[in-house]
């Protein structure tokens, strides 16, 4: 009451307050000074009420939980009550309590006996419970009354509020001050009583009072009191009741959340104190209140900073450590509110990611991760917590599965969700389904093999849930199953046994029989995804089970398609309802046909699998019906008896292009599935497709061919019957031409069809698709080589095609049709891409023979390719469409396009398309790096094909060509692409390395320097090369010999160009010298090109005296200190030099031309290095006896074998180092004599250059003492210079050997 009086004293003076009370027939016992004095006693409640003749006056002191007497008690008694003796007073009491209908026991419990006799009767409720409100006001604060009695009074008052709310409110709401006093008394009781049942009753009564009174003043007062109570509390020990009240108050009046945050913002600090207080009851009440605050969007926005800076880590920690179910539930409730907002989700998941990174690093424990907290709750045995946890996971994922799913996947959440699918709780199973569906949108869900772990649980769950009467559960389970079946990578097998496939198929079969259409529709989609080769690859393939599944699917669709449409009672169909019903039928039929198409594809794919032809476990001699052949015949029969009738029936009601596309695809597959039935099936299909038009038009046709042509050419206005006759004539001509029966002139028919199409355009008609398809085919086949479509006809064809849903509906696979679409820019620009796509997908040949350049000569082109090549020569811009097809088509189609394009480029070297292709490829590559910069290998499976084409285009370029800006941009983008790859991305790196290598070696010196500078600035590329060089001698994880060759050649090129140009080095790479020497001493088998590449690198390193700023050669592990004689050769040692010499000799003996060139070049560089450091060692190495044996082994290769360039260079080397024991003066003379007799015009440029070097070296060494030998040498030198320009054109320097780009001059020189 003291707080109440303080509140009113702020609003009016003491006299005004007294007058206000008297106006309402109230009389106060204390003067104003007494009121102020009592208001200062914070430990007492000094006001108690007695009721007499409608007036309430303080009668007896009622201190709250205090034994001290009120100071104003006696004064009040003297001023208000007249003198009376005790007997009179007792009589009044008895009269007051002796009211009718009031038992003595109830009186003792509900009435405050010593005060009730003074209370006006209207304060006594006239209905049960017979409670006097005035007594309640005086009894509840009274310290002498037991808690049990107070609890009973409160309980009765609560019941009265619930049963007779309007009656109680009329009494309480007579004056706001009474209301606030009642609220103050209840709040005081709440704060000072520790009995939990009483506090619960207080809270309940306070909530009912405030919500039913609807007084802003009372609500604000209660909020202020709660705020003061929490602020004045030294610890959070006694805060439970206040916090609980606040939470339930905000729950009852949601608008209070915004006021509480705006007007009591500092209260949040006290809530944080409660959240870390070691009492889970207090923590639970804080979480409950926070949950109510964050349920308001306005309050949540204002508390955003509070959450980010303070609450988030504390809340996650509290949730992680929660032990009581009450706290766990309230934490999950708060979490659910937070997860409604995207910003809060991002903050929580960011904190979780930070916590996980802290835990992964070895250090002090960090913050708590939300996925791990929810995982802990999933592991609990409490179903409520499991469901709530699953709901929270779902609430996170719906914001962005791609962004947030990885965290849950790394925490192995799916493992436990799959386990919950076996629960008997429908709610838990449904919640788990939802989570798993969202997680399935992330590829990591499949790559971490979660589906392999959980597929059996999903199938078992489907079997169990289909027995429950819960349609939503059925749909969610089937949706999850379909998602897994659809997204599962082909390389990760989902079903490891036939038994698992059988169980899955039977679950789908059971779902297909569901009377609920939505469930059956989901089952059809799942069945379609189930019919994939990788899902059915477990042997033996259960064709009978698949047949039963397809029969169930087709039967369900047939039953649905035959269901009569709903009709109104009046007999008139509702158009809207009918349209919806037809649309539902179409969608269901489309899904069914897609599933059947997948079954047909499955049969086609299994035709190339001998192990899938029949059941390998059939007993010998027993007839096996579970075979691919029987399954294929079933497919044909099912299509004939079910699919075709359903499609024809639906086509009478509506047009669905997508459905017809799938249907035609099924028909095409069936031709392959059952080839021996192809002719019979084709006749039946052809008759059914054209029969409707022909049966209407044929009776009207009685004219001869010229008259029919004239009628078809008539452009006058055509009525319906006449137009049908034209359609019929056109189809007859079409059928005749496809059967090669040309009974009219092609030129005349060409003009007639053009006139027919213009007539349709003039009348604004759209012909049936089969008619338009026949028209386009006739125009294509009848067009003369020199003739051309009229511009108006081409425009009409384009307009007709624009309303065709998909070009395949009017496409006929024929070279002339391809020519028609690509010849006219108006058609090519709009439909060229789709026509070429269809053409390549219909081409049955893979054209692999065109890619075989080793066979010598060029194979004859098929007629279709000859037409395409002719078109490409006349319009090279079509190459850009082919380039797009390589990038965007399925891999098999893209490879076919690549082979054809490569063949065209090889056969038409005069067509300059390099700039066109490179420019378009640059755009594709820039787009790819922009969208998939972090992982370009996953962007497109066709990227390696494009890169190989780019390498081919680069190979066609002339040597010594300046790199323009386009080439430099392309070089930069390809190097960026390489830098983002790993050594295992061989398909991308091999063609990319080839392109980089050729770009460096197929240009001028100035461009070489610019290109090398660009590549050296790419630190990621240099780091990749370092990793790949180290993999050369790795036992596992090697990317392949060809890619290693390219890596060594690129590194050698970079090092040489950096050294010669003094280019800046941004990133060094290190190589283990011992491993390099070991690789040359013990080369891999059949790896001559790899040895040559390493030799090329070692030669470059020797030429730079191991001082390259780019390449650092490191020792392998700890090395003993070098011997004194080895110091001068550092980093090489004498033993290493001798070992390397032996390795080079062994490689030379292999007599591989490219390897021999690399060996001689490395030997030259090694002897130069040794001679500069220690001439004695160099001479010793050059004079090794094995060198003579090596030389004569090489010379023993046929007549004039000494005129091979590598042998001439080797002899030059021995002459230079005066190794007479290896090559004597007489032997030199024999070589000179043989060279003089040889026809120099037949020698290659490399041989002539080597021969000239040999002669000059012999002359400089003074080995020509014999005059005749000198004359021979002089004549040879004189003949060499003029003949050098007369020799045959030099061999191509740039080659592709075993898929590796190689420059012969780079290897040789």
Image: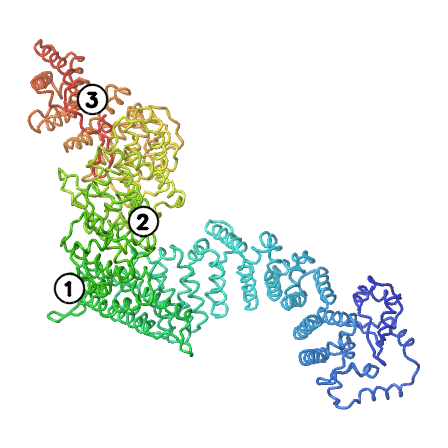
The residue labelled by disc 1 is 680
Q: Position of residue 303 (x, y in %)?
A: 61, 55
Mark 3 — residue?
A: 1180
Upstream in sequence: badge 1 or badge 2? 1
When asked about the image quadrant of residue 122, the answer is: bottom right
Q: CA distance from mark 1 to mark 3?
A: 86 Å
Question: On screen, 200 above or below 724?
Answer: below
Secondary element at image label 1? helix
For marks 3 and 2 on the same chain, the one whose residue lies earlier in the sequence: 2
In the rendered image, the residue lying farthest to the front is 716
Q: Of the residues under marks 1 and 3, which one precedes in the sequence?
A: 1
* Mark seen at residue 798: 2
**Distance between the Cα atoms at labels 3 and 2?**
83 Å
Whether residue 1038 is visible to the viewer of this picture, yes or no, is: no
Q: With respect to residue 951, does 692 lie above or below?
A: below
Residue 69: x percent and y percent? Answer: 84, 73
Q: Is residue 23 left or right of residue 1182?
A: right
Q: Residues within 10 Å of mark 2 (few under 14, many from 20)?
A: some
């Amino acid at each position: 009451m003291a707080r109440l009086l303080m509140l009113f004293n702020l609003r009016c003076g003491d006299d005004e307050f007294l007058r206000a009370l008297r106006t309402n027939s109230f009389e106060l016992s204390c003067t104003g000074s007494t009121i102020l004095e009592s208001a200062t006693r914070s430990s007492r409640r000094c006001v108690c009420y007695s009721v007499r003749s409608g007036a309430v006056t303080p009668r007896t002191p009622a201190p709250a939980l205090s034994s001290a007497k009120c100071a104003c008690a006696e004064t009040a008694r003297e001023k208000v009550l007249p003198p009376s003796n005790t007997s009179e007073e007792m009589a009044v009491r008895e009269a007051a309590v002796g009211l009718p209908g009031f038992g003595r026991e109830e009186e003792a419990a509900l009435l405050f006996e010593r005060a009730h006799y003074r209370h006006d009767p209207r304060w006594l409720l006239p209905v049960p419970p017979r409670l006097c409100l005035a007594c309640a006001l005086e009894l509840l604060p009274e310290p002498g009354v037991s808690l049990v009695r107070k609890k009973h009074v409160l309980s009765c008052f609560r019941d009265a509020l619930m049963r007779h709310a309007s009656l109680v409110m009329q009494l309480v709401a007579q004056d706001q001050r009474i209301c606030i006093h009642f609220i103050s008394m209840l709040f005081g009781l709440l704060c000072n009583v520790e009995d939990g049942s009483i506090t619960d009753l207080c809270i309940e009564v306070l909530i009912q009072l405030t919500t039913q009174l609807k007084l802003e003043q009372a609500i604000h007062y209660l909020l202020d009191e709660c705020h003061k109570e929490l602020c004045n509390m030294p610890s959070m020990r006694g805060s439970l009741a206040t916090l609980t009240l606040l939470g339930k108050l905000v729950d009852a009046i949601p608008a209070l959340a915004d006021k509480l945050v705006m007007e009591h913002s500092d209260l949040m600090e006290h809530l944080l104190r409660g959240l870390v207080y070691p009492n889970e009851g207090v923590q639970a009440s804080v979480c409950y209140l926070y949950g109510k605050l964050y349920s308001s969007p306005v309050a949540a926005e204002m508390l955003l900073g509070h959450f980010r800076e303070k609450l988030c880590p504390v809340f996650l920690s509290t949730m992680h450590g929660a032990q009581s179910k009450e706290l766990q539930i309230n934490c999950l409730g708060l979490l659910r509110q937070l997860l409604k907002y995207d910003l809060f989700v991002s903050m929580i998941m960011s904190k979780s990611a930070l916590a996980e990174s802290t835990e992964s690093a070895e250090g002090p424990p960090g913050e708590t991760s939300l996925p791990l907290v929810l995982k802990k709750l999933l592991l609990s045995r409490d179903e409520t917590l499991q469901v709530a946890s699953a709901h929270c996971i779902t609430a996170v994922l719906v914001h962005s599965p791609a962004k947030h799913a990885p965290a849950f996947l790394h925490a192995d959440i799916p493992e436990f969700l799959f386990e919950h699918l076996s629960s008997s709780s429908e709610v838990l199973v449904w919640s788990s389904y939802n989570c798993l569906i969202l997680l399935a949108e992330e590829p990591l869900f499949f790559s971490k093999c979660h589906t392999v772990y959980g597929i059996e649980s999903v199938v078992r769950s489907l079997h169990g849930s289909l027995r429950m009467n819960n349609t939503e559960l059925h749909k969610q389970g089937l949706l999850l199953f379909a998602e897994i079946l659809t997204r599962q990578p082909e390389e990760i097998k989902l079903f490891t046994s036939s038994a698992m496939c059988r169980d899955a198929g039977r679950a789908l079969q059971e779902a297909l029989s569901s009377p609920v259409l939505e469930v059956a529709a989901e089952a059809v989609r799942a069945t379609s995804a189930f019919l994939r080769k990788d899902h059915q690859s477990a042997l033996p393939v259960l064709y009978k089970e698949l047949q039963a599944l397809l029969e169930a699917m087709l039967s369900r669709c047939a039953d649905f398609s035959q269901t009569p449409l709903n009709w109104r009672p009046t007999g008139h169909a509702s158009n809207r309802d009918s349209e919806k019903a037809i649309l539902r039928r179409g969608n269901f039929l489309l899904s069914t046909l897609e599933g059947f198409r997948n079954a047909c594809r499955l049969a086609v794919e299994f035709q190339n699998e001998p192990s899938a032809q029949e059941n390998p476990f059939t007993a010998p001699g027993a007839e096996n019906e579970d075979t691919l052949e029987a399954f294929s015949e079933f497919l044909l029969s099912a299509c004939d008896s079910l699919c075709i009738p359903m499609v024809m029936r639906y086509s009478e009601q509506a047009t669905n292009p997508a459905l017809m596309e799938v249907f035609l695809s099924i028909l095409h597959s069936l031709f392959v599935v059952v080839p021996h039935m192809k002719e019979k099936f084709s006749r039946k299909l052809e008759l059914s497709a054209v029969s409707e038009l022909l049966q209407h038009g044929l009776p009207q046709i009685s004219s001869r061919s010229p008259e029919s042509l004239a009628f078809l050419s008539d452009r006058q206005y055509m009525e319906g019957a006449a137009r049908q006759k034209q359609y019929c004539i056109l189809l007859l001509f079409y059928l005749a031409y496809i059967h090669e029966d040309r009974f009219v002139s092609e030129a005349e028919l060409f003009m007639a069809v053009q006139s027919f199409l213009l007539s349709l355009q003039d009348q604004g008609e759209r012909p049936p698709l089969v008619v338009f398809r026949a028209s386009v085919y006739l125009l294509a086949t009848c067009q003369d080589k020199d003739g051309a479509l009229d511009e108006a006809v081409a425009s009409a064809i384009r307009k007709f095609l624009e309303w065709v849903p998909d070009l395949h509906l009017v496409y006929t696979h024929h070279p002339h049709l391809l020519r028609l679409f690509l010849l006219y820019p108006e058609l090519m620009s709009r439909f060229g891409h789709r026509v070429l796509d269809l053409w390549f997908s219909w081409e049955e040949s893979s054209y692999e023979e065109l890619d075989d350049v080793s066979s010598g000569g060029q194979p004859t082109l098929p007629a279709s390719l000859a037409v395409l090549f002719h078109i490409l020569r006349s319009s090279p811009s079509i190459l850009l469409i082919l380039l797009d097809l390589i990038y965007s088509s399925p891999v098999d189609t893209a490879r076919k396009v690549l082979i054809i394009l490569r063949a065209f480029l090889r056969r038409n070297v005069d067509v300059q398309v390099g700039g066109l292709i490179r420019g378009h490829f640059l755009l594709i590559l820039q787009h790819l790096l922009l969208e998939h910069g972090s992982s370009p290998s996953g962007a497109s499976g066709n990227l390696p094909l494009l890169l190989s084409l780019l390498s081919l285009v680069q190979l066609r370029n002339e040597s010594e060509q300046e790199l323009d800006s386009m080439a430099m941009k392309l070089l930069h983008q390809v190097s960026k692409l390489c830098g983002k790859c790993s050594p295992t991305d061989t398909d991308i790196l091999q063609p990319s390395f080839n392109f980089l290598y050729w770009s460096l070696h197929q240009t001028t010196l100035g461009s070489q320097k610019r290109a090398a500078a660009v590549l050296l600035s790419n630190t990621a590329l240099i780091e990749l090369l370092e990793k790949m060089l180290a993999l050369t001698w790795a036992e596992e994880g090697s990317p392949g010999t060809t890619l290693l060759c390219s890596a060594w050649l690129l590194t050698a090129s970079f090092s040489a160009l950096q050294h010669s140009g003094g280019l800046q080095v941004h990133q060094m790479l290190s190589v283990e010298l011992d491993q390099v020497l070991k690789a040359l001493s013990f080369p891999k088998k059949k790896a001559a090109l790899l040895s040559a590449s390493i030799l090329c690198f070692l030669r470059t390193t020797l030429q730079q005296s191991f001082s390259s700023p780019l390449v650092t050669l490191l020792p392998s592990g700890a090395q003993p200190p070098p011997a004194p004689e080895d110091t001068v050769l550092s980093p090489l040692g004498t033993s290493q030099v001798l070992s390397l010499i032996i390795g080079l000799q062994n490689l030379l003996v292999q007599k591989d031309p490219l390897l021999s060139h690399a060996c001689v070049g490395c030997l030259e560089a090694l002897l130069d290095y040794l001679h500069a450091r220690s001439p004695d060692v160099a001479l010793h190495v050059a004079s090794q006896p094995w060198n003579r044996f090596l030389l004569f082994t090489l010379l023993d290769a046929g007549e004039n074998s000494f005129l091979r360039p590598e042998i001439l260079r080797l002899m030059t080397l021995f002459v230079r180092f005066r190794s007479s024991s290896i090559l004597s003066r007489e032997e030199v003379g024999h070589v000179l004599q043989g060279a003089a007799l040889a026809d120099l015009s037949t020698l290659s440029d490399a041989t002539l250059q080597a021969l000239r070097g040999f002669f000059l070296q012999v002359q400089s060494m003074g080995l020509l003492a014999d005059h005749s030998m000198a004359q021979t040498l002089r004549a040879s030198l004189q003949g060499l210079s003029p003949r050098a320009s007369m020799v045959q054109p030099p061999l191509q320097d740039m080659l592709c050997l075993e898929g590796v780009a190689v420059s012969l001059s780079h290897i040789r020189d």
